[in-house]
Image (tube, rainbow, N blue to C red):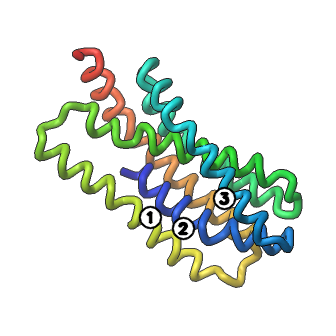
Amino acid sequence: MLSNFAVGAGYSAFVSLLIPPFVKDVTGDASAAGVVMAIIALGALLGPALGGFADKYSAHRLVLVGGVAGMVLAFVMYALSAEIPELYAIDAIVMGVAIAGISAVGPVFIVGARLPQDVEARQLTTFSLMMPAGQLAGGLLLAGVTSWAFSDRFWLAAGVMAVALAGVWFTTAEPSRRLKEAIAAG
């Protein structure tokens, strides 16, 4: 659940509200912002490969936690590379791959655990609603810091994602165990 909240806050709020104006501000070119956003989308195309890796090696928790950690890393990279436009593509690739990992395996923790149908339905609904909740929280948070420099807002985004990372780490051990048992049982 927290991973989808992180995607909502991280991608739907922080990325979409920070990166385009940031890239345009630094480069003076609005099309550069479009290129960076396209690179994020290209990185996200690795979702099926990451999902396949997680399925093959029962590494769903690794991919999920790694995805949230990747978002932390990407925001740190944006904060540190604030004046180095040549690094934006690398930052964008890290962000896209991180989002791909979360998106590919997040729902598997619910569907793959073979829960009773009514429980699964409620959990999938909650999981789906966590993204707009994260988007709302992230958007409101950014609205309160519009006077901050872009690098400071990227540090804030990294901090929020780090809190989400801790939450995902501490809440996925047991679901991961149940998922592995369900997969082993076939």
Q: In this view, does 69 lie above or below 12?
A: above
Q: At 72% from the left edge and 78% from the top edge, which residue is drawn?
A: 148
Q: At 64% from the left edge and 65% from the top edge, which residue is drawn?
A: 156
> Where is mark 1, residue-wise?
134
Q: In this view, does 166 lie above or below 65?
A: below
> Where is mark 3, residue-wise?
37
Crowd rating for badge 1 (residues with CA inside 10 Å; few <14, some 14–19, many 20+): many
Spatial distance from mark 3 to mark 2, Cα to Cα?
13 Å
Asked if disc 2 and disc 1 are in contact, CB closer than 8 Å, the reply is yes
Residue mark closest to the camera, 1 vs 3:
3
Compared across the picture, whether 20 is left or right of 118 comes to right
Find numbered disc 3 in the image and state the secondary structure of the residue it sits on: helix
Task: Check the picture and name the quadrant holding the C terminus.
Answer: top left
Give the residue type at disc 3.
Met
Give the residue type at disc 2.
Ala
- Choose the circle earlier in sequence order: 1 or 3: 3
Find numbered disc 2 in the image and state the secondary structure of the residue it sits on: helix
Does residue 69 appear in this view?
no
Q: At 82% from the left edge and 63% from the top edge, which residue is drawn?
A: 82
- Choose the circle earlier in sequence order: 2 or 1: 2
Residue mark closest to the camera, 3 vs 2:
3
> Where is mark 2, residue-wise?
13
Crowd rating for badge 3 (residues with CA inside 10 Å; few <14, some 14–19, many 20+): many
Measured from the top left, where is residue 47 in percent x and y?
51, 38
Give the residue type at disc 1.
Gly
Compared across the picture, whether 50 is left or right of 128 comes to right
Seen from this angle, which residue lies furthest front? 31
Spatial distance from mark 1 to mark 3, Cα to Cα?
20 Å
Q: Which mark identifies residue 173?
A: none
